[in-house]
Amino acid sequence: MNDDAPGQPARRPYTYARRPLAEPDWRRLPGWRGVTEAQWRDAQWQRAHCVKTPRQLRQVTGDLLQESFYADLAADAERFATMSMLITPQLLNVMARDAGAGPAGYTEAFLADPVRRYLLPVRSDRHPVWPSHPRAQRDSLHEAEMWVVEGLTHRYPTKVLAELLSTCPQYCGHCTRMDLVGASTPQVVKTRLTLKPVDRQELMLDYLKRTPGVRDVVVSGGDVANLPWPRLEAFLLRLLELESVRDIRLATKALVGLPQHWLQPAVVSGVARVAAVARRRGVNLAVHTHANHVNSVTPLVAEAAGALLEAGVRDVRNQGVLLRGVNTTAADLLDLCFALQGEAQILPYYFYLCDMIPNAEHWRIPVHEAQRLQESIMGYLPGYATPRLVCDVPYVGKRWVHQVDGYDRERGISYWTKSHGIGLGEPADLARRFPFYDPIDTLPEPGRRWWSGEGADPEAS
């Protein structure tokens, strides 16, 4: 059946073709020419060879990256970066995987690479006029305001977020927890967790014992892959002792960025022990990861996801972020979702609008574009594997992008309502409408003028 208008060419915006996953050959890079497959598959080798500085990037890429790139990178670090540089070899290897020969071709491909765009931002990526939205905030979702004990955010009636640590194996430039996670940068002196980990965990468990209305615990950070497995397992087994807890979700970008961690025999056997207890108790144990582009989904990622499922995890799900220049076309999203669902056994779950953190305007898209994206991907994937595009609204929580309660397209202000009164520091009035803001450079000229004047005043809207 063709629903196109008579006389108009048929519109087929996406054609599915199965694409087997591929692991780029790391030996194409000068610094890794002698790295064996055994080394590449070793989690400790991966951690020990993470790229944290421009000097280390030079050691890997040799003379492939031109000096102009390093100048661009230094300018960003000095004025805009909210996250320090930390890239696993696994993720660096998927960048510029099909680059042309020579420094000019490689540098051009590296700058254009979608994974590079969010893991290693440079000054020329940032918007020249509006690098930040006037309403941007470091803790854009006000999670710390909703801590019931340090690191435990009670934002929804039946769910909590347990931030066990503040580090990851790799840092994404668009990190929603940029205020807490990672090392400080010239722009951001990070907030620090102050309690000892064991004391923090005890307070979390005590709160959950006293709050039986909480049935769902997201165990995160940071990234749980940076917590030594025996400590993570001990915490999970304590959680499983609580009769009120029915869902446990482990949040780890490392399934994509450091799949070698989740393939370690000690970790796999530990996951199996926890999964067995969860299964006996009828608790849903899942792993949530974070892939934003199809190029980051490789055979090692699929192998790690399969190992978790075989160990007894009920689901492995993906929560990505919509990022300009990375994944904000129907083809980009569908390529990624088919790789996740069809090749790696990872369920596409959510794609979030990028949160309103400082210096993120070049990544963000307006709500109406996300609405069109949601509509454009419908009908291709199985219903259970069709991701929901959501806006995480400050003081409200996740809302499907079509749940907007009002929308001033000229000024780029959408309004949202909430369905509960949970969350410390939140107004209790459920009738109140809460604002979210489109990136200013996407607005019509009258809207851009308004933000240049009256709208730049935090009290104006």
Image: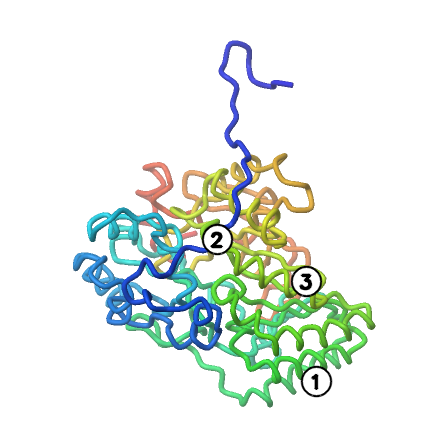
Classify 238 as above or below 145. Answer: below
Classify 234 as above or below 359. Answer: below
Q: CA distance from mark 2 to mark 3?
A: 21 Å
Contact, CB < 8 Å: mark 1 with mark 3?
Answer: no
Between 306 and 114, the residue placed more toward the observer is: 306
Residue labelled with disc 1: 206
Q: Is residue 441 left or right of residue 331?
A: left
Residue 143 rendering spot, x and y as whole percentages? 54, 69
The amino acid on which the numbered mark 2 sits, given as a three-letter code, is: Asn
Q: Is residue 110 left or right of residue 302?
A: left
Q: Which mark is residue 258?
A: none
Which residue shows up at 24% across the image and 52% down it?
A: 107
Q: CA distance from mark 1 to mark 3?
A: 30 Å
N-term-proximal mark, 2 vs 3: 2
The amino acid on which the numbered mark 3 sits, given as a three-letter code, is: Leu
Q: Does the rendering let one see residue 133?
A: no
Q: Which mark is residue 292?
A: 2
Q: Does the rendering let one see residue 461?
A: yes
Q: Nearer the viewer, mark 2 or mark 3?
A: 3
Q: Nearer the viewer, mark 2 or mark 1?
A: 2
* Residue at disc 2, secondary structure: loop
Residue 308 rendering spot, x and y as whole percentages? 65, 65
* Residue at disc 3, secondary structure: helix
Residue labelled with disc 3: 309
Between 401 and 375, the residue placed more toward the observer is: 375
Farthest residue to the top: give it: 7
N-term-proximal mark, 1 vs 3: 1
Q: CA distance from mark 2 to mark 1?
A: 36 Å
N-term-proximal mark, 2 vs 1: 1
The amino acid on which the numbered mark 1 sits, given as a three-letter code, is: Asp
Residue 437 rendering spot, x and y as whole percentages? 45, 50
